[in-house]
Amino acid sequence: MHISIKQVIAVVAMAAAGSSQTPDLRAQRPVVPGTGSEIVGVADDFEDPEWNYIPRNPKSTEDIDENQRGPMGRTTNGRWYEGIKRGHPDIVKRVTTPPGGLENSTGSMLLQSKFTGIPNKPSGKMGQDDFVANVQYRLRRKLNVSEVPSVTTRVFLPPVSEWENRTGPHFGFRLALETTAMVDKESGIGFFKRTTREMGNEIYWPGMFIEFENKNQTQKENDYATIRIRGNRRGKDFTGPQITSTGWWTLGMSVTPDGMVHYYASPGVDELTEDDYITSQFPYDYRAERFRTFFYNICSANDGKRWSTAFVVDDPKVFVLRPSSKLATKPSESNQR
């Protein structure tokens, strides 16, 4: 197997720091997100002036109080839906693409929240909302990792003065993956209810968070932002590259047939390249078997007063390098360069 110089440098640096994030050199070579063919019908460019989201409030908070509060919100084009676990952001709408975006892009999607927990019941503890791409159900199947799926997205980071005045994660870009692992299974009812462990289907959510360190809360000289990676073999997040500029960024993740997740990021809106590589991981020590979808997280203090940082996303796309069935695809732009 060929290991690039950049990967070797990354491994040496991590090992020198005593990091548990050292990639497994026996794993397959990372695949740049956007490699292969784009799957038609699951992306969204937000160019339709009639693009709209129907929230169907109040939103779901299953993770807090086991209340799903259906029916769930959906976009009118059927490409996005409210996450059952945590509910949708308070504001989901089409906006004019901020300056510096993709060429000819006139529309993008704004995501922002105030109540990231139970609606209208602030807890004062950081919460997060989910906004989920409708990939699995539109395709009527999951993607096997042998197809080498990947996802890319553009995200606009507003000027630092417009960020929520809070240290912690503000935005997430994540995958929903499946593997076979030991899972809890409940049986019986009431007094006879019991939980056993057995092999079953496990869903997990690796990804990247944009994390902000407010200088007033950290006593640092300047505000500071980084990309935080979820996660390593022990399920722990770790700090990735520093974000040195606001404006547009391109993020991407790919999954190779060995079940490994590969993370990439770059300032600007250009297609990702090998130079944008961050790390490769087996999050939670899982080896992915199937790709379900991707989604965004919006995080806030959930104090009922402050709005989250307003993030704008554009042109999310799903790709496969080796489609195993007759998917409607077209060559990616990166392949045409």
Image (tube, grey):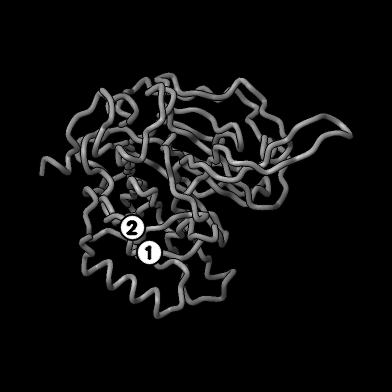
Q: Which residue is mark 1?
A: 23
Q: Residue at the far right: name it.
A: 191
Q: Is residue 297 left or right of residue 6?
A: right
Identify the residue shown where x is 36% and y is 61%: 279
Q: Which residue is mark 2?
A: 27
Quarter of the rendering occupied by the C terminus: top left
Can the viewer see residue 43 in this picture? yes
Residue kind at label 2, given as amino acid type:
Ala
Quadrant in the picture for residue 107? top left
Task: List x then y, in percent, for residue 56.
Answer: 59, 22
Q: Residue at the far bottom: name it.
A: 16
Q: Is residue 318 left or right of residue 114?
A: left
Q: Residue at the far left: name it.
A: 337
Residue kind at label 1, given as amino acid type:
Pro
Quadrant in the picture for residue 218? bottom right
- Between 113 and 75, the one lying in front of the other is 75
Identify the residue shown where x is 75% and y is 40%: 195
Identify the residue shown where x is 50% and y is 55%: 285
